[in-house]
Image: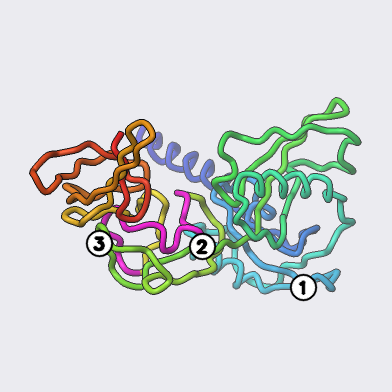
Amino acid sequence: MRFAPLLLLFLTLLSAASTDLILKDHYSYEDEKVFASDLFPQISDDFEVLTIPPHLQHFNIAKQRIFDLFKRHGVTLAGQPHGLVHFRRQLRLDLSALKERLHSYYMKQLPFLTINKVYIRPKSTIQALPKHFEIEFKKQLYKNNRGTIKITGGGQRIFFTFQLDATYSQFTATQTLHKGDPITSLNTKMEIVPFKHFHEPIIGYAELGQVEARRYIKEGKPIRKKDVQPVALVKRGGIVNVKLIEGNILIHFSATALKDGRIGETIFVKKDDGTRLKVKVVGQNKVEIE
């Protein structure tokens, strides 16, 4: 019975060894970018391993470099990192129709993207796409630059993994902004950033000079639409021009705004005699009695 713990340990180690990631000496590829899942399909947290120059049909790389790269991503490969790994380009599968559909899907959802290239790889061996097929996109797939899609057609159901090489422009704060600060070209700058994940809608050129900070925005942070609000056209304590229409009579007089007001908002103003009136903001320092 005293050998039972040793036997259990041996079986545990044997089971663990069977799941080790063993780097092969030879691989074939289609796209120039080779990902971890191309080498080990069981990997769930994918990442790029290398980019092979498009004019090459063969490419060699030292195993040590691949071992080191996987280690930086928290993955330990089995075996010894000696020698080379050989890559050979295989006949390219025509996925242009699928790439175009995926490109259109992303541009419809995120029209501000600049898509440089779409990489798609089938999860199983296929010779060609069905002549007619439908694509199934997971809900909110567009929020990430990589994922899985499924096509059906010709009695087939085929899964693909994909990744976008894309960028987008965003405005970031060049100084710390506080609530009420106007958002203009003087306190922002435009940056081009890689598209990895989509979080919140961001402001564009049209908003500059038309919005102000809704909350504290730290220097260097991207400015999201939820961080801003329309500029107050009426300021608390400011003098506003009040318009009143009674029948065919148009009356104008001045009053003092009792709070900030944005276009379309309802606020109160006070006349010189102390009378409070409910008005709607219609322009810069202009209001109408409702």
Left/right placement of residue 147 relative to residue 246 reads right
Camera-nearest residue between 282 and 243: 243
**Residue 205 magenta:** yes
Instruction: Please name the residue that numbered disc 1 is placed on.
Output: 53
Look at label 1 and name its amino acid: Pro
For residue 90, above or below residue 266: below
Q: Nearer the viewer, mark 3 or mark 1?
A: 3
Left/right placement of residue 34 relative to residue 252 reads right
Look at label 2 and name its amino acid: Tyr
**Residue 63 magenta:** no
Within 10 Å of the Cα at label 3, are there few (<14), some (14-19), or many (20+) other Cα atoms? some
Residue at the (74%, 49%) spot, across then down: 121
Within 10 Å of the Cα at label 1, are there few (<14), some (14-19), or many (20+) other Cα atoms? few
Q: Split into 4 quadrants, where in the image is the C terminus?
A: top left
Q: Position of residue 93 (x, y in %)?
A: 86, 51
Q: Position of residue 11 (x, y in %)?
A: 49, 39
Left/right placement of residue 6 relative to residue 242 reads right
Label whose residue precedes the other's in the sequence (3 or 2): 3
Mark 2 in CB contact with mark 1 (< 8 angstroms): no
Count how many numbered circles sit on residues in the image: 3
- Secondary structure, mark 1, is loop
Residue at the (32%, 45%) spot, across then down: 281
Is most of the magenta stretch helix, strand or loop?
loop
Camera-nearest residue between 225 and 276: 276
Highlighted magenta segment, given as a residue range: 199-219
- Secondary structure, mark 2, is helix
Instruction: Please name the residue that numbered disc 2 is placed on.
Output: 205
